[in-house]
Amino acid sequence: MKAGAESVLYHPELKRFVRMANRNEDKSWEHDRTIDSSMYGLWYFGMFEPDDPRIVRTMEAIREKLAVRTAVGGIARYENDYYHQQSQDIATVPGNPWFICTLWVAEWMIAMAKTRADLKPAVALLEWCVQHGLPSGVLAEQVHPYSHAPLSVSPLTWSHATFVMAVREYLDKWKSLPK
């Protein structure tokens, strides 16, 4: 699987992984270049190290292209995500911010941290989740990119579970790093 991902899903011109590849009749590959936050799974599930330069460039592309550029912030699921889409201004709102997608970026930042100071950007994303949850602590699936109201399923167990995992990863990393 890893060899297949390296040979088919890694795009040398883009210097990052792509979301999907389809085989054409002439046996060439057609790549879906859409930035998709689920590409974090390439490192999270152990196929590649989080500091592999190809993963670094992929995760940086996720951070750059999927950042919601409104006062709400957060990370979208993928470029031009149509699910409960609230804006056609894709440059500002590539999709609604999702708790899990924002947390996936935080988990990568945690994995990459070499010092406790390196953890600060991840803490900001954990705090984003707290700030955009309901006062009860309930986390939805997504957040409205302008009003920060919950969108879609609420509460979403997956959002809560990912938040707990990210906090645990943060605490483990904090303990493992020199003071």
Image (cartoon, rainbow, N blue to C red):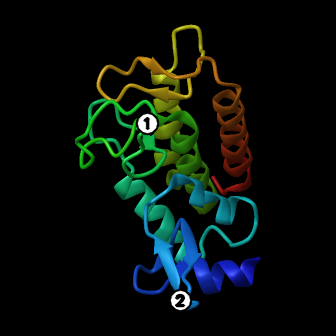
Residue at the spot 52% in from the left edge and 53% down from the top edge: 37
Looking at the image, residue 117 lies above or below residue 141: below
Mark yes or no: residue 87 visible.
yes
Residue 10, x across and y down, in percent: 55, 80
Residue 78, x across and y down, in percent: 45, 50
Mark yes or no: residue 115 visible.
no
Residues at marks 1 and 2, CA–CA distance in whole angstroms: 35 Å
Quadrant housing residue 176: bottom right
Question: Which circle marks residue 97 in the picture?
Answer: 1
Within 10 Å of the Cα at label 2, are there few (<14), some (14-19), or many (20+) other Cα atoms?
few
Judging depth in this view, the residue of 86 and 163 nearest the camera is 86
Judging depth in this view, the residue of 138 and 168 nearest the camera is 138
Residue at the spot 68% in from the left edge and 71% down from the top edge: 49
Lateral position of residue 53 relative to residue 70, left or right? right
Residue 90, x across and y down, in percent: 27, 46
Q: Name the residue that disc number 2 marks.
A: 28
Within 10 Å of the Cα at label 1, are there few (<14), some (14-19), or many (20+) other Cα atoms?
many
Looking at the image, residue 21 lies above or below residue 98: below
Residue at the spot 63% in from the left edge and 31% down from the top edge: 159
